[in-house]
Image (tube, rainbow, N blue to C red):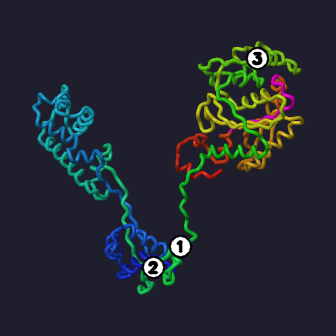
Amino acid sequence: MGESALSNPERRMLAALLGNPDQDWSLDEVLSACSWHDQAQAVGAGQGLADAGLVSLNEQASAVWTLGIEGERAHADGLLEARLWNWLVSQPESERGMGDLNSAGFKRHETGPGVGLLKGLGVKIIAGSLTLPEDASEFSGVADILSARGDFLASLVEGMSEESLDSSMLAHFKGRKDLIVSSESVSRTWKVTEAGMAVDSSTLVEATQIADITPELLQGDGWRNAEFKPYDVNLESANPMTGKAHPMQALIERIGAIFLEMGFTEISGDYVTSAGWNMDALFIPQDHPAREMQDTFYLDNPASIDIADEQLKSWQEIHEHGGDTGSLGWGGKFSPEIAQRGLLRTHTTVNTIRHLAKNPKEPCRVFSVGRVFRKESIDRTHLPEFHQIEGIIMEPGACLPMLVTTLKTFYAKMGYPEVRVRPAYFPYTEPSLEVEIKWRGEWLELGGAGIFRPEVTEPLGCSAPVCAWGMGLERLAMLVLDLDDIRQLYISDLEWLRAQPIL
């Protein structure tokens, strides 16, 4: 590194150090030799010279202890145990009871800890009265300890390095809240290296250095004799702390953009719905385990949600004997009261079912991304409130190959080109599939898919087959963001959030 590449502060500091190249220069000595008052100038220039190999830098960190909030109060008014001791010594034996402490002006939150501290020094409580040590040496020993503690606090008014403090006294005050606090102090020394000694001090002349080329600069001639400060393109740049969307929100927007690009339309729905639309419409039997309280949040308000009698009758026929679909149904007795119970939706499929019920004859490709609720125990892979991605295709000729191709296209656009499907079972689709993607050499299941059964579509009046799928958004987010714990997505960790990529 040539002398011309050094900044003016670096030139001044190196010239000063060359005046005595064998010396280990302290910060104060550098400040004095360079006529500086700001230590940041010396530290910055010294670091630049050290990076250039012209000086060696020696740093030693040490803890410095000073008074905390309670320590400052104790230094001004006296330590709690010292004030209690002085009061005890001045009181007759008959007036040293716990009740007398409050009368003497000691606050209620002080008496307990204060008495505990005195008991550690030899003061006893006998019949509710504080008793001083009878032995003269023990009595004077307490006074000496209290005096030493006061002197220790007084020594920390300006701050002291940990090495210069009494270790036993330091250990005692560390265990007491807010009496003393520590901070890290770094001492630095600099010494010229062989490379620095080879620099001709006559070349270390400070000159005008230009870091930015501006229109105003080019209008004059001052730049002709100036030096242009070089830039090191290999240095790490600071990450800008700019605002950006939360990773979950960014992922939702990315998923929505992909589906819109594929020709789909976004739909939404309410969190609160009935068991009929949430489960009965999907041909889930009323005695299915998913109906149990441990899986579903049933509501007290509204406890019941009205459903049209015609719709209830249609579901009843399907569930009891299959209606006109050729199915045998589930048998048993269908309960309209159970169907009308209010709950928080357990999946977003209720959105697509309601959309089909309102538009049974119109071909459609729709999707939704929304919150769902299940009574799950919170752990690294489960939450009671999470998001689902749901989609359907209803049109003449809709079939299983169309469904598989759609899912493979979606995941390829998400960055996962290796997709496979496996046979599965769901009460409301036939055939049914589980969708898996290749991640880190392993196949991971991300959702289910299939063709809605006639028991689902015919009560809605659908005119064409319906391809359907659903997947967990948080599971996908864990893959995209490389997480092992789903709870990280909802922790207010600014450092983690700032480090996340823009999706």
Helix, strand or loop under label 3: helix
Q: Which residues are magenta?
A: 459-472
Q: Is residue 234 above or below residue 200?
A: above
Q: Is residue 313 above or below residue 59?
A: above
Helix, strand or loop under label 1: loop
* Viewer-nearest residue: 314 or 333: 314
Q: Is residue 177 above or below residue 465?
A: below
Q: Within the magenta stretch, is there residue 470?
A: yes
- Residue type (three-letter) at the residue carrying disc 3: Leu
Regarding residue 137, the answer to whether it shows in the image is yes
Task: Give how far across and how far down residue 300 sits, in percent.
Answer: 59, 19
Task: Give how far across and how far down residue 199 sits, in percent.
Answer: 45, 84
Kindly identify which residue carries mark 2.
Answer: 208
Are the residues at dot 3 and dot 2 in contact (C-beta closer than 8 Å)? no
Kindly identify which residue carries mark 3.
Answer: 312
Residue sitting at x 76%, y 46%: 261
Kindly identify which residue carries mark 1.
Answer: 214
Residue sitting at x 55%, y 49%: 496
* Viewer-nearest residue: 46 or 323: 323
Regarding residue 441, the answer to whether it shows in the image is no
